[in-house]
Amino acid sequence: MFEEIRLEGNFTLSSGKRSNYYYAFETLTPTEVKSYSYKLSSLLTEKFPKIDYIATPAYGGIPIAFCVALDFCRPLVVVEKRYNAIRGPKTKGPYIIVDDVISTYDEIRRVEKTIGYPPLAVAAFIFRGSSEAKEWPTIYLEKKEEEL
């Protein structure tokens, strides 16, 4: 899964880490994003059927989180990186953070800090970390090579 968007080279990723591989999610068609997002939503609804909203860090995870929010029929909250500002409805209650790739959990922690309380879980298409966080369950479609 996701081999169709895997690029080989020498990349500096948004985490600041280096990798010989980059997953170009922006090259997925809307139909592919929706299909993969539905698979992720299905995994989430099994374990977390009652949530109030979906949160995501800007920018890479927005299309995925939007589709998951549609699947749950819940609002989407986007946390801006520059000012840690929240875009979307003001809401309280259980939520899930959705991103495209999780590796260091830095973006996840930033979103949690900005919102002010922990999510029920975090989710992504790809997990590239060395170990899963103990703070929250981590749900993903594929585990890929770790970042360097």
Image (tube, grey):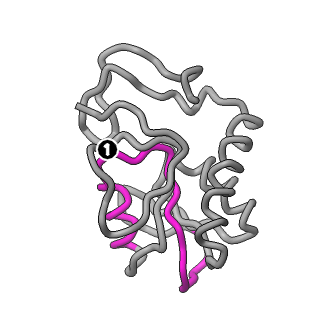
89 or 27, which lies in front? 27
In which quadrant is the C terminus drawn?
top left
Q: Is 69 on the left or on the right of 4, as rendered?
A: right
Q: Is residue 17 above or below residue 141?
A: above
Q: Is 55 on the left or on the right of 128, as rendered?
A: right
In the rendered image, residue 70, in percent from the top left (x then y), is placed at 74, 61
> Residue 91 in magenta?
yes
Q: Secondary structure at mark 1?
A: loop
Which residue is rendered at x = 67% and y = 48% of the image? 39
User: What are the residue bounds of the magenta stretch?
Assistant: 88-114
Please give the count of numbered marks on the rendered protein. 1
In which quadrant is the N terminus drawn?
top right
Which residue is rendered at x = 63% and y = 47% of the image? 63
Q: Is 7 on the left or on the right of 43, as rendered?
A: left
Which residue is rendered at x = 62% and y = 51% of the image? 40
Q: Is 1 on the left or on the right of 37, as rendered?
A: left
Three-letter code, disc 1: Gly
Q: Quadrant of residue 92?
A: bottom right
Kindly identify which residue carries mark 1.
129
Q: Is residue 30 above or below residue 8?
A: below
In the rendered image, residue 121, in percent from the top left (x then y), is placed at 47, 67
- Residue most toward the front? 46
In the rendered image, residue 126, in percent from the top left (x then y), is placed at 47, 41
Which residue is rendered at x = 68% and y = 57% of the image? 42
Q: Quadrant of residue 106?
A: bottom left
In the rendered image, residue 52, in percent from the top left (x then y), is placed at 63, 79
